Structures are given as C-alpha cells and as structure tokens.
Amino acid sequence: MKLSDVEITDFSGLNSLNTAFNCNADMYVRLQFLEFKAALNEKHFVITTPDHKVVAVGSVRPSNLLKGQLFMHHISVDPEFKNQGCATKIVRAIYQYAQDNSFVLTPTRFEEEGMKYLAPTMAKLHREFPDLPISYPCNPNSVDDKPITGERDYEISYFRKLDRLNKIRFPANPETCQDELTIGPIGAPPSMCR
C-alpha cells in the first residue's frame, strides 16, 4: 500500500483527520504515544494511507522556557505499519523543520523499543543534518551543556530502569563499524567500535 509523504499540521488538522474519517476513530489508541491533551499544543508530522487512515505521527513543541528549543515529544507508528520506513520519514521531516527554523532539537526520552530502533535511526539521519544541534536526554557528549551536532562520534545514554543504563555509540563515519546497543549496569564502560 502506498503511504503519503509526511504532512505537517497543527492540532486542528490532526483532529480533522480524526473526526472526518471513521478509520481514525481509534487513532489515540493505535498510536501508542499520541495523547489528546498534549496534541493540542504540538505540531504534528503525519503519514496516512490513501483512505486517510493515520498510520504514523511524530509530534514536536517549542519550549515555553528555553527560546529556540524544540522538544520531540514522540514518534508513534501503527503496529500494522512498522518496518515500512514511517519513523525514518518522520524523523527526517522533523530534522528538516528544526534546522529550517533554527531550533535545538531535544528528544524528551526513549522507551525501550525507541532506544533499540529509533535512537539508531536518529543518529544515522543526523549525519544528513550535521549542523542541526540535538540535545539528547542524559547526554554524555555535551561540552559545557551544549548540544551535539552530527559530524562527530557520539553516544546516546538513557536510564531505562534504576539499575540499568542503555548506551548506544555512533561513529562519525558509519562505515567504520556497526552501531552497537549495550545494556549494562550503571557505570559500565561505553561500547567501543574497533
């Protein structure tokens, strides 16, 4: 099935897809991290089927406190449409939007599945937008609390559980080694490329 390109909309556009097309009646259930209350204040990056069923949404919102900061709230893909490149298309569109509008992009957090699949996608796509500053949660790469850019090696860390630290390392040249996901106890050394 051919899916739409990513369309950018505000809440009224997202809501009109929900109310105008019966296939979206369960949209807030199918798309795990899409929350109605949060959606009111967010900009949405949407992919639909030809019959207007929303199959993937990425949502961002500017910070109320930090000028120039854009929070990436979530990327949600309908389970029936996973592994079809929807998240990659949405991340690329969000990166383009953030770069075009001079934002520092801040993903709010990664769930376990996001750490495994979305974090590597984000790091790989960051190479296409090397000047885009991204401030990852639990960022061990920041220098003087400055966000990282995509032209150098970096590692993403996220505390998923109190006794576990997820880390993933990305080389500046992705051909030099495989991306690795290491889940280990807090204080474990980062995975290294050889």
Image (tube, grey):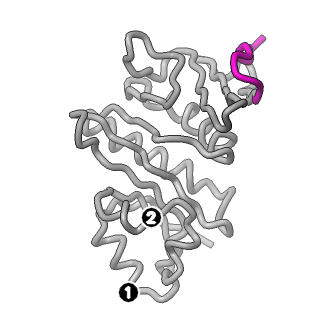
The x and y percentages for residue 126 are 50, 31
Mark 1 falls on what kind of element?
Answer: helix
Q: Amino acid at mark 1?
A: Ala
Identify whether 18 is placed above or below 4.
Answer: below
| Relative depth, front residue between 143 and 46 | 143
The residue positioned 55% from the left and 37% from the top of the image is 122
- Tell me which label, 1 or 2, sits earlier in the chain: 1
Identify whether 147 is placed above or below 129.
Answer: above
Mark 2 falls on what kind of element?
Answer: loop
Marks 1 and 2, how far apart at CA: 19 Å
Using residue 107 as the reference point, say whether residue 144 is left or right of it: left
Quarter of the picture holding the C terminus: top right
Circle 2 residue: 35
Q: Amino acid at mark 2?
A: Glu
The residue positioned 37% from the left and 59% from the top of the image is 44
Circle 1 residue: 20
| Relative depth, front residue between 32 and 37 | 37
Identify whether 24 is placed above or below 149.
Answer: below
The x and y percentages for residue 144 are 38, 10
Write down the region rendered in magenta: 183-194
Most extreme residue toward the front, as rendered? 162
Task: Give the dominant element type of the magenta stretch: helix, strand or loop.
Answer: loop
Q: Is residue 19 magenta?
A: no
